Amino acid sequence: MDAWAISSSFYSICFVRVPDGAGRRLEFSGIGEFHLYDSANANGGVTKKLMQFAAKNKPSVLAHVDDTAIDLLMAHAPDARLIWAHTGIGGAPAARVDALFSKYPQLMGELSYRPQGEQAPSGGSERHEVRKRGGPYLCPDWRTLLLKHPTRFMIGSDTWVNQRWQYYEELMKGYRVWLGDLPPDAARRIGWSNGAELFGVKTGN
């Protein structure tokens, strides 16, 4: 599944800039989402070139990886802007995510598909599936983490196939529930401003 990470032809196809029909060079502000199912492939030749390309040319990189791979990817290019898709996926606890955020100032977190960062409003134990009673609420450890790093997180939709758009409205409603439990400025940043600023979208006043 990670064959691209070690394929010499993949980099040439995807990351060598090609002039478009108008004679301008194609520009982009992000790369990904890419997956690494084996964190060791974060040391693949293409993966290393990708991270170094990002550090040099400044697009953000969205990576679906575990916490081990975060360390490996950032070792290739500490100045690259890496967005951790589904932050903590694979079972990394909030404390581990916090340590990585402290270690890598350029690391940001995307929060789609992270039900294990949520718990039922009854105060039940942390689960891998969101309980639907009253909507999703952040568990204490993750709430503390988001409030410690309010400029480093953003929500996402994970609309990687067309069918996912059928659930987009429901997903956004769920975000609004737990964002509404945060201080307004933190909620605004995580729900919109952080992502907008990262990709150059005007945020208004």
Image (cartoon, rainbow, N blue to C red):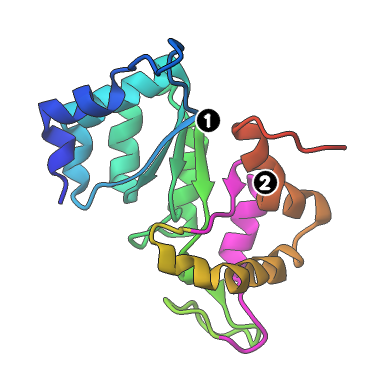
155 is higher (above) or lower (below) than 43? below
Is the residue 118 above or below the residue 196 in the image? Answer: below
| Quarter that holds the C terminus | top right
The answer to which quarter of the image holds residue 44 is top left
Tell me if mark 2 has few (under 14), some (14-19) or many (20+) residues whose alpha carbon lies within 10 angstroms of its own: some
Identify the mark nearer the N-term, 1 or 2.
Answer: 1
Q: Residue furthest front?
A: 21
Does dot 2 land on a helix, a strand or a loop?
loop
Tell me if I can see residue 17 in this picture: yes
Between 130 and 101, the one lying in front of the other is: 130
Task: Give the image location of residue 43, x and y in percent.
Answer: 19, 33
From the top left corner, tell me how far across and down residue 10 is, in percent. Answer: 18, 31
Name which residue type carries label 1: Pro
Residue 40 picture quarter: top left
* Quadrant of res 3: top left
Q: Is residue 135 left or right of residue 26?
A: right
Image location of residue 25, percent across then percent down: 43, 14
Residue under the point 46% across and 70% down: 116
Check disc 2 and report the residue beneath it: 150
| Numbered badge on residue 105 | 1
**200 above or below 171?**
above
Residue closest to the eye, 186 or 19: 19
Looking at the rendered structure, the kind of residue marked 2 is: Pro
* Tag shown at residue 145: none
Instruction: Using the rendered image of the protein, determine whether residue 151 is visible from the camera's viewpoint.
Output: no
Instruction: Give yes or no for residue 93 being in the magenta stretch.
Output: no
| 111 w.r.t. 59: above or below | below
For the residues marked 1 and 2, what is the alpha-carbon distance in whole angstroms? 13 Å
The span picked out in magenta is 132-157
Point 12% across, 34% down: residue: 6
Q: Find numbered disc 1 in the image and state the secondary structure of the residue it sits on.
A: loop
* Residue situated furthest right in the rendering: 205
